[in-house]
Image (tube, grey):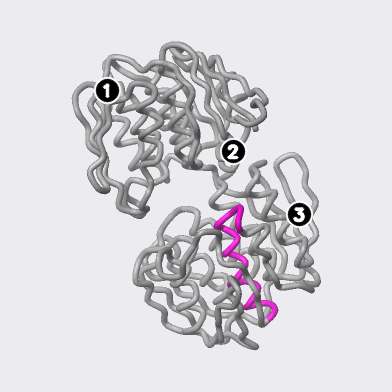
Amino acid sequence: MDQLLIAGGRPLNGEVRISGAKNAALPIVCASLLTAEPLKLTNVPGLRDVTTLVKLLKGMGVESQRSDNGMILVGTDIHTPVATYELVKTMRASILVLGPLLARCGSAKVSLPGGCAIGERPVNLHIKGLEAMGAQIRIEHGYIVAEAPQLKGARIFMDTVTVTGTENLMMAAVLADGVTILENSAREPEVVDLAECLIKMGAKVKGHGTDVIHIEGVKTLHGAEHRVMPDRIESGTFLVAAAATHGDVTLVDSCPEALQAVLEKLREANAEIEEVGNRIRVRMRGPNHGVSLRTAPYPAFPTDMQAQFMAMNTVAEGTTVITETIFENRFMHVQELRRLGANIEIEGNTSIIRGVPSLEGAGVMATDLRASASLVIAGLIAQGETCVDRIYHLDRGYERIEEKLGLLGADIRRVAGQEGA
């Protein structure tokens, strides 16, 4: 099991190119199930999650060709509309095949995501929406079994904002008979990117980027070419790493318009931000003031950036408060940051961080994707060496992060972990 060894205390300086967005690429790859013609994608990140999803689609009948940062997907014959537990358990986003499979094939059998009880996470909203469109759905032996010879347009109100739920229902609706209106929809840029790809494929979608999306179903979709948007969470992670190390870093091929909540918090922390086209430059103007924040659906502060800001706050002046409103158990990185010397208390869904003069390197263990990023940032600002274990989480969402950080001057390297580590 690979590990990252980081010798901290070095400011990051230079330019870094941002990869395509994982959270946009995954639903867009699933959109290949909606047409028999080729879907040509560029700016596709080379990530484990993308590879897993392509493997899942191959078992259904989708052929793929990969080149540099591009991909061609051809779903001429979807012969097996089944997503098995063996692959779905490794990636929650696999649920995104449910809507397009049902729309294209009239049936689908998709494993429930690992560790997910129907009532606890928004998978129930996917099912409720598809049932409103006429699908017959039952749960059998851990699988969602769905049938609908022809989905019908419907007005669907989602009780809570769900990104994957919005994406799944939008993909189902593009081939439904009639008009579908999704109310209380997610407004995330990745939802907009999927909608733009679907429109290029011949779908009739309006209102994406707002909380009401209007979809007029069509009989078939055709092939298209689409460039996946830049990854705003990777962008935010590098911006925080630069600010936390008191560096001077410019992001290339980024997406400033999708990062305004993050950029505003960095300015509040005393960073100077310059936005020019698709480039963002960040540098600290003086002491790290730290920032209190509260996560909420887009366009508010993203939950996927909470852990990174917490790492920066550990060495900020004074006391900061972070409130997590999106996911439970999203503070699993706290105990690892404490191992580095951070002073953090948890009260329910709130963390109270009292800044310390410095962190000290130690062995830490990643518990999830964004927690991994926070531990890397903490390692970059800590004195001495930090060893981050279980970085397979990191590889799910960051493309060659150690190479990119190394080009910015970080002392970081990947090593093979010891057996039993």
Q: Which mark is residue 343?
A: none
Quadrant containing the C terminus is: top right
Tell me which label, 1 or 3, sits earlier in the chain. 3
Q: Nearer the viewer, mark 2 or mark 1?
A: 1
Give the farthest residue toward the front. Answer: 420
Q: Position of residue 35 (x, y in %)?
A: 71, 70
Identified at 26% across, 27% down, the residue is 290
Tell me which label, 2 or 1, sits earlier in the chain. 2
Give the farthest residue toward the left. Answer: 318
User: Disc 2, disc 1: CB below 8 Å?
Assistant: no
User: Would you say residue 101 sits in the magenta stretch?
Assistant: yes
User: Does residue 43 show up?
Assistant: no
Amino acid beneath label 1:
Ala
Q: Residues within 10 Å of mark 2 (few under 14, many from 20)?
A: many
Q: Nearer the viewer, residue 265 or 402?
A: 402
Q: Quadrant of residue 285?
A: top left
Identified at 67% across, 57% down, the residue is 87
Identified at 27% across, 48% down, the residue is 349
Q: Nearer the viewer, residue 403 or 56?
A: 56
Q: Nearer the viewer, mark 1 or mark 3?
A: 1
User: Is residue 112 placed above or below 393 in the rendered structure?
Assistant: below
Amino acid beneath label 2:
Ser
Q: Which residue is mark 2?
A: 19
Q: Which residue is mark 3?
A: 72
For the residues labelled 2 and 1, the Cα–Cα distance comes to 29 Å
Q: Quadrant of residue 265?
A: top left
Q: Which residue is mark 1?
A: 316
For the residues labelled 3 and 2, the Cα–Cα distance comes to 18 Å
| Magenta-tinted stretch | 89-105
